[in-house]
Amino acid sequence: MRRLSLGLLIVGIALMGCKENKQQEATEVNVESKEKTTIKKTKFIEGTLVYKMSLSDSLIGRLIEHISQDPLYSKELAKKYIEEQSVADRDRIKQFLTNNPLFLKEYSTLPFIKNNVYVAGYEVVYKGEGATYILENKWNDILDEGFVYASSTIVPNTELNFSYQKEFLEREQLHKQITLENYNRVATGEISNVAGYEVEKVIYTINEKSENKNLPVSVTLYTSKLFNPVINKVLPYYLNEEGGILKLEIEMAGVPHNVKMVYEAEMAVERKLLEQETVVLATKRFYGTKTKDDLAKLEERLASIFAPLSL
């Protein structure tokens, strides 16, 4: 009888131990889950944002990434990439490029390799890289003044600097402007989470009055008022919103509805910026932007730097 009682006691203790272990495991899982879903509620004053640009169609996106490894041999790299795919995927890529001849020119000039944004109060520095260029852009919202470094990665001796004022932004040399003149804006009220911050979804749809056929058909953005909207002025698409834009979904003209360009902040880290993160590279080639002649020379130079890939 004593042996039976002792056995029952041991079993009871073991069961209690298992229960405690399960409760502990459940608690640890809950803690990890809470840490992963923690939403930041304080204003982002100083720090860095790392954006990623991609295509919703990964097959086409990988093609662009593959040929950007060496833009001078983009045709050879594209051929190799296509040959490595299945017959069905080969046909889909060829059909896509045939049906959307302007797509490569449009997308390949965007900075899909690197997109870092450094912000401190009303000043922001952007450091990005496309298939054929490096771009650094500093903007001060109080002074209404910017300073740029740009250089081709495939053509030597093309690096340059220029300063600019607010009016230069309208020339769309550094980004495309999405304005209410060409678009209808709808704030959906939908709230989601991007990079640990709550964001509101806003949809811009091109209106019938717009005469610019090269503009995106629609732009869906996710914005947070915890970020100074100064960051919007250095992104590849500029929208005049009250909050900082953490994500963009672009439906480009002449491209199937199911293929969208996605530009999203993967990380937003509050910290003191390093000195090299607050400045752009300087060269001896400085271009003016005050006269029409200045602008014509600069735009011609920039066109050779922001060169599209070819197949």
Image (spheres, helix red, strand yellow):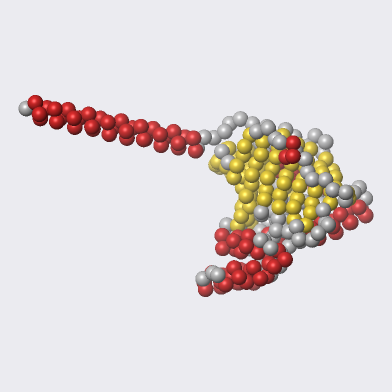
Residue drawn 49% across the image and 38% down it:
36
Front residue of 172 and 90: 90
**Residue 308 x, y percent position in the rendering:** 73, 62
Task: Note whether 190 is above or below 27 in the view shown.
Answer: below
- State the quadrant of the C terminus: bottom right
Left or right of residue 214, residue 29 in this image: left
Front residue of 149 and 258: 149
Residue drawn 62% across the image and 39% down it:
268
Residue drawn 63% across the image and 34% down it:
270
Determine the residue located farthest toward the top in the rendered image.
Answer: 2
Task: Note whether 221 is above or below 11 in the view shown.
Answer: below
**Residue 249 x, y percent position in the rendering:** 62, 52
Task: Note whether 134 is above or below 39 in the view shown.
Answer: below
Residue 47 in view in this figure:
yes
Determine the residue located farthest toward the left in the rendered image.
Answer: 1
- State the quadrant of the N terminus: top left
**Residue 2 x, y percent position in the rendering:** 9, 26
Q: How many marks?
A: 0
**Residue 281 x, y percent position in the rendering:** 79, 45
The image quadrant of residue 120 is: top right
Residue 189 in view in this figure:
no
Front residue of 308 and 114: 114
Front residue of 35 and 208: 35
Residue drawn 23% across the image and 32% down it:
14
The image quadrant of residue 137 is: top right
